[in-house]
Image: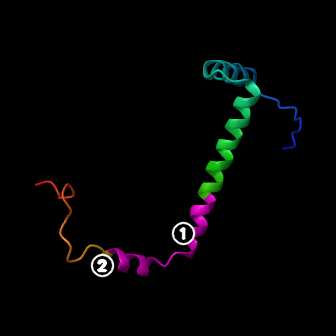
């Protein structure tokens, strides 16, 4: 894996807090920042993935499938609705 350097400018208070959290987690500040960036990218990609999937969805067809599911089958043990 290729690594590169990047001069990151953080507000002093943000840097102090990041250092504290990294120390609490028992990891280097660099590793903590790498993981934080990876988590943010993952969240953004997940959001765009679901938006793309939703744009392709056929809502009437999905509702039809859901309306048919479970018809004629009693609830399995433990799946009953509360009284």
**Which corner quadrant holds the N terminus?**
top right
Residue 31 in the figure: left or right of residue 43: right
Colour basis: rainbow
Dominant SS type (magenta): helix
Q: Which of 42/17 is in front?
A: 42
The residue sitting at 87% across, 35% down in the picture is 6
Q: Nearer the viewer, mark 2 or mark 1?
A: 2
Residue 1 in the figure: left or right of residue 20: right
Q: How far apart are marks 2 and 1 (CA)?
A: 21 Å
Residue receiving disc 1:
54
The residue sitting at 73% across, 30% down in the picture is 31
Residue 72 in the figure: left or right of residue 68: left
Q: Neighbour class for label 2 at 10 Å: few (<14), some, many (≥20)?
A: few
Q: Neighbour class for label 1 at 10 Å: few (<14), some, many (≥20)?
A: few
Q: Is mark 2 on a helix, strand or loop?
A: helix
Q: Does the magenta stretch include residue 51?
A: yes
Q: Is residue 42 above or below residue 49?
A: above
Q: Is residue 64 magenta?
A: yes
- Residue 30 lies in what quarter of the image? top right
Which mark identifies residue 68?
2
Tell me where the magenta segment starts and ends, as one range: 48-66
Pinpoint residue 79: horizontal percent, then vertical percent.
22, 58
Q: In this view, does 46 lie above or below 20?
A: below
């Amino acid at each position: 894996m290729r690594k590169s350097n990047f001069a990151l400018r953080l507000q002093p208070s943000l840097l102090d807090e990041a250092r504290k959290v990294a120390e609490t987690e028992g990891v280097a500040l660099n590793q903590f920042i790498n993981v934080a960036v990876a988590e943010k990218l993952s969240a953004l990609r997940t959001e765009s993935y679901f938006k793309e999937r939703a744009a392709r969805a056929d809502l009437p067809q999905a509702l039809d499938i859901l309306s048919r599911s479970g018809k004629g089958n009693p609830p399995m043990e433990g799946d009953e609705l509360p009284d």
